[in-house]
C-alpha cells in the first residue's frame, strides 16, 4: 500500500489546512412537525484539503507523480492525518484533476483533497 | 517529427507554468458512503499552460511555425516537459527501459543521498569499458543537461555521455566516497531524432548511482523521480485552434500556449 508523500520537512500539509467530518443523515419531516431520522453512515468519513505552497520541483513533481500513479481517484493509499497523526489506511484523492503551478524556483503550489474510504 | 522549440537561451519555458494532470474514473457511491471505483487509465492526460512573455521574434516565430505546421489541434509534435525528467525509471537501472553492457552488475537497494535506499551499486566486471544507457526519442539539436548522483568506495571514474548519429558529448569525472551530483551539458546541434544518454564505467569500476535525470535545458534543476512516464511526449498537441500573440514592442512578444499530451 502506497502512502501519501511527505514534504522534505516530513510533513504532509501546511497552514491553512481543512479537515471535514461527514455524516449522511436522511430526515423525513411530517405534517405534525414530527420527524424520523436515519443514519446513513455508521461512522463519519473524513476529508482533508491539503494546500501546499513554496514547494521545490522535487516536492511538487513528486506529488504529481503520486497522483498519476494512483490514477486520480481510482487508487487507494495510506494517509496520516496532519491534525492528530492518526493513520487512515484506505484513502483516495477526491477528484480526477490535479493542477500544479510552477511560479518560480522553489515557488510551486498545489492543492488536493484527500478523502477517507469505507 | 516536429518538436516544440526551445527558447534562444536553451530554456524550455518561462515561469510561470501550470501543469494539469487529468485522469478519468467511474465512481458509484453507495448509501453507506462506500464506493465502487472503476479506473480508466487510457484516458489519463497532462496539460501545460506556458505563459511566455518577452519572447524575441525568432522565438515566437518558431512557435508559430510549429502551430502552422501541425495545423492547430490537428497534428502532433514532440513536447519535452519543461519540469520533467525525460528519462523513464530514473532509479531502476535494471528495468528494460535501460540498456546495460553485458558484464555490468547492478545491485539495487543501496543507501542514497536522500537518506533512503533507492540507489544502485554498479560494477563493471567486464574486460572492456561498459555503460548503462537509455535512448530517448528527442531532437538532437536541443540543449540538454544529464545529471546523476554518484560515489565510489574504490577509486573509480564515471563518464557521462550523450550520443546521437554523427556526434557525442562526454565528460569523465573522478568520484570520491561522498555523494556528488555530476552533470553533463549537452549541445550536440545535430538534426537527429534520438539521443542516447548514459553513464560509462571503466574496467573494474565500482560506483553507486542514484537518480539520473535528463532535462531539456541548460543546467540541472531539482531531481524528479520517474516511473513508467518520462517527460517526453511524442504525441503532444496544441489544446486550441487559436494562437494569439501580443507584440509589446520591437522584438518583444507575449504568448500563452496550451499543450496536451498523454
Image (spheres, grey):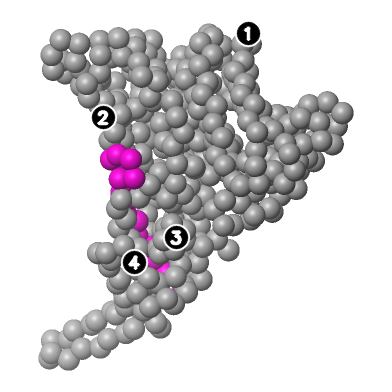
Badge nearest the viewer, 3 or 2: 3
Check disc 4 and report the residue beneath it.
A48
Find disc 1 in the rendering and name its residue. Answer: B166
Callout 2 secondary element: strand
Residue B133: x percent and y percent?
A: 67, 29
Q: Range of the magenta residues?
A: A102-118
Q: Are marks 3 and 1 on the same chain?
A: no
User: Which-is-in-front pick, marks 4 and 2?
Assistant: 2
> Residue drawn 76% across and 30% down?
B202
Task: State the CA–CA distance, disc 3 to disc 4.
Answer: 15 Å
Q: Residue furthest right?
A: B127
Residue B145 point in image, percent of width and height: 50, 27
Q: Are marks 1 and 4 on the same chain?
A: no
Residue linked to disc 2: B51
* Local SS, label 4: strand
Measure the alpha-carbon separation of dots 1 and 2. Answer: 35 Å
Q: Chain of mark 2?
A: B
Q: In this rendering, is residue A72 above or below B235?
A: below
- Of helix, strand and loop, which one carries label 1? loop
Q: Which residue is mark 3?
A: A6
- Is the residue marked by circle 3 packed among few (<14), some (14-19), or many (20+) residues within 10 Å? some
Amino acid at each position: 500500500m502506497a502512502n501519501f508523500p511527505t514534504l522534505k520537512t516530513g510533513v504532509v500539509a501546511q497552514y491553512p489546512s481543512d479537515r471535514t467530518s461527514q455524516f449522511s443523515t436522511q430526515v423525513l419531516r411530517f405534517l405534525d412537525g414530527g420527524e424520523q431520522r436515519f443514519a446513513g453512515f455508521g461512522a463519519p468519513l473524513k476529508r482533508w484539503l491539503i494546500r501546499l505552497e513554496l514547494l521545490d520541483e522535487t516536492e511538487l513533481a513528486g506529488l504529481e507523480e503520486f497522483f498519476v500513479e494512483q490514477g486520480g481517484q481510482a487508487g487507494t493509499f495510506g494517509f496520516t492525518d496532519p491534525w492528530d497523526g492518526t493513520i487512515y489506511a484506505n484513502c483516495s484523492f477526491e477528484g480526477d484533476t490535479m493542477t500544479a503551478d510552477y511560479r518560480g524556483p522553489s515557488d510551486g503550489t498545489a492543492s488536493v483533497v484527500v478523502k477517507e474510504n469505507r | 517529427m516536429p518538436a516544440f522549440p526551445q527558447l534562444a537561451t536553451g530554456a524550455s519555458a518561462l515561469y510561470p507554468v501550470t501543469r494539469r494532470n487529468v485522469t478519468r474514473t467511474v465512481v458509484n457511491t453507495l448509501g453507506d458512503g462506500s464506493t465502487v471505483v472503476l479506473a480508466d487509465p487510457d484516458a489519463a492526460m497532462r496539460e501545460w499552460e506556458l505563459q511566455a512573455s518577452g519572447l524575441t521574434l525568432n522565438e515566437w516565430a518558431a512557435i508559430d511555425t510549429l502551430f502552422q505546421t501541425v495545423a492547430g489541434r490537428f497534428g502532433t509534435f514532440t513536447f519535452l516537459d519543461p519540469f520533467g525528467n525525460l528519462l523513464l525509471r530514473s532509479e531502476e537501472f535494471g528495468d528494460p527501459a535501460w540498456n546495460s553492457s553485458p558484464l555490468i552488475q547492478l545491485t539495487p537497494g543501496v543507501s542514497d543521498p536522500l537518506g533512503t535506499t533507492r540507489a544502485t551499486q554498479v560494477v563493471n566486471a567486464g574486460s572492456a569499458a561498459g555503460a548503462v544507457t537509455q535512448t530517448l526519442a528527442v531532437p538532437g539539436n536541443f540543449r540538454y543537461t544529464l545529471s546523476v548522483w554518484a560515489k565510489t568506495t574504490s577509486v573509480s571514474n564515471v563518464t557521462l555521455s550523450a550520443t546521437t548519429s554523427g556526434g557525442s558529448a562526454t565528460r569523465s569525472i573522478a568520484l570520491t566516497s561522498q555523494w556528488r551530483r555530476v552533470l553533463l551539458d549537452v549541445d550536440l546541434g545535430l538534426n537527429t531524432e534520438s539521443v542516447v544518454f548514459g553513464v560509462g564505467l571503466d574496467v573494474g569500476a565500482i560506483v553507486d548511482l542514484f537518480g539520473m535525470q535528463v532535462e531539456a535545458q541548460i543546467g540541472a534543476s531539482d531531481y524528479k523521480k520517474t516511473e513508467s512516464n518520462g517527460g517526453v511526449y511524442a504525441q503532444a498537441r496544441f489544446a486550441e485552434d487559436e494562437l494569439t500573440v501580443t507584440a509589446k514592442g520591437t522584438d518583444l512578444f507575449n504568448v500563452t500556449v496550451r499543450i496536451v499530451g498523454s
